[in-house]
Image (tube, rainbow, N blue to C red):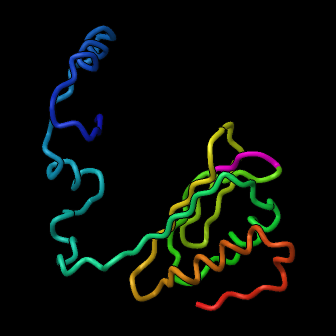
Amino acid sequence: MLQTKMDTRALEIDAAFSKNALAVPDIMPGQAIAPLMLNADPAATRASTGPHPDYISWQYRTSDAMDHNHMLAALENRPDGLYRLKGIVLTEKGWFDIHAVGGHTAVTPVHRAGETALVGVGLKGRLSLGAVDKWWARVGSTDYSQQTIAN
């Protein structure tokens, strides 16, 4: 079985199957594959479509380098309600890709030039954009450990 998101034939894929003496697969609708793969009917388990929660976003840009250790400390102490944070940050140690969601944070070195750019997302009513501004402003401070966040 070959599972794909495609709903139309791709001639290059069909040619690869034929070249290797394999039968060209049949395309089945997604509803037919889900019970085979998941032993469940997604339509039967889908939650009711109530109103979608309101999200708010926070953005930050600068051409200044951030303090690397302060950045790491800040990422470990994100404001309540900041569910996702993603972007590229310049520190004195170079460029880093930042990805934070839930309790997971990844900081990966990258080769890049330009400016620091971050985007954060949270639920409206649970995330204070002012608190996020104060939180991230601490990254450039000289004494990160002595500052507190007010949500």
Q: Position of residue 128 (x, y in %)?
A: 50, 84
Residue that extends furthest to the front in the rendered view of this protein: 63
Boundaries of the magenta span: 93-97
Q: Is residue 35 above or below residue 146?
A: above
Q: Is residue 81 above or below residue 73?
A: below
Q: Residue at x 62, y 48 (%)?
A: 115
Image quarter of the C terminus: bottom right
Q: Position of residue 22 (x, y in %)?
A: 28, 17
Front in this rendered view, residue 46 or 69? 69
Q: Residue at x 21, y 48 (%)?
A: 33
Residue 95 located within the stretch drawn in magenta: yes
Q: Position of residue 120 (x, y in %)?
A: 51, 67
* Magenta stretch prevailing secondary structure: strand
Q: Would you identify the image quadrant in which residue 44 lies?
A: bottom left
Q: Residue at x 45, y 76 (%)?
A: 122
Q: Position of residue 67 (x, y in %)?
A: 80, 61
Residue that extends furthest to the top in the rendered view of this protein: 19
Question: Is residue 147 shown left or right of residue 55?
Answer: right
Front in this rendered view, residue 66 or 55? 66
Question: Is residue 128 shown left or right of residue 19?
Answer: right
Image quarter of the N terminus: top left
Q: Would you identify the image quadrant in which residue 17 lies?
A: top left
Question: Is residue 54 shown left or right of residue 68?
Answer: left
Front in this rendered view, residue 71 or 66? 66
